[in-house]
Image: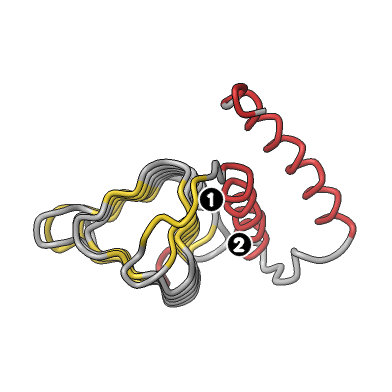
Amino acid sequence: MSQANDQDTFTFGPDVTIDQAAYIDPTARVFGKVSLAEGTSLWPYAVIRAEMHEVQVGRFSNFQDHVAVHVGASNPTIIGDYCSITHHAMVHGATVGDNTIIGINATLMDGVVIGQNCIVAGGAFLTEGIVIPDNSIVMGTPGKVVRSKNNFVQTRRNALIYHYNAEAYARGDYRAWSGPDYEAWQEGMLKAVDAEYRRLHPDEV
């Protein structure tokens, strides 16, 4: 685990596997069969539990403050690469595709499947078994697709900004999102993300 924190301060169960996380806050709690891929970050008071089934978290994804993740009665929880699970969101036995943002206070119930390049708006409530196609914006209670749009640039950008901040927190730097160094990094990052979008989706350019 490549971070400044002392791993002994974490409250993790014995079945948790971590592959070079960027930052894990000491207040995070992770129990059961959980795997965290390279570059992931867990922010203050994030909780992940997997007493049965499992939780898989992809590369460069972030679980922000007070996020709760649990398995469902019949389903694991799978989070793709470059996903942002934002403050106070709940993911319960759901699958989230790559490059997706789950908004503040949103809830995903058992069997929900979110495609790639999606945005689930803050406060949305997705009931059991809903399937959301790729490139969707979801709002409401119950959550419904309100617009089809490839959100790759916005969602990838958000995940990379959180990864930048995670590496800073691991160094003890809590003001990384300000100053000329960050502005220069962000400019280069945006160009790289735009180039990746054009490479992956040439028909949409």
In what quadrant of the picture does the C terminus appear?
top right
Tell whether 154 sits left or right of 47.
right
x and y, in percent, of residue 103 in the image = 48, 66
Q: Of residues 164 and 189, which is closer to you in this image?
A: 189
Most foreground residue, 94 or 56: 94
The amino acid type of the residue labelled 2 equals Ala
What crowding class fits label 2: few (fewer than 14 Cα within 10 Å), some (14-19), or many (20 or more)? some
Disc 2 is placed on an element classified as helix
Dots 2, 1 in contact, CB < 8 A: yes
10 Å neighbourhood of mark 1: few (<14), some, or many (≥20)?
Answer: few
Q: Is residue 124 visible?
A: yes
Residue labelled with disc 1: 2
> How many labels were placed on the picture?
2
* Residue 136: x %, y % from top left: 46, 48
The structure residue drawn at horizontal position 34% and vertical position 72%, both measured from the top left corner, is 141
Which of disc 1 and disc 2 is earlier in sequence? 1
Q: Element under label 1?
A: loop
195 to 176, vertically: above or below:
above
Residue 25, visible in the rendered structure: no
- Which residue in the protein does label 2 denote? 170
From the viewer's side, name the closer residue of 9 and 32.
32
The three-letter amino acid code for the residue at tag 1 is Ser
Query: Which x, y percent locates residue 187?
Result: 82, 46
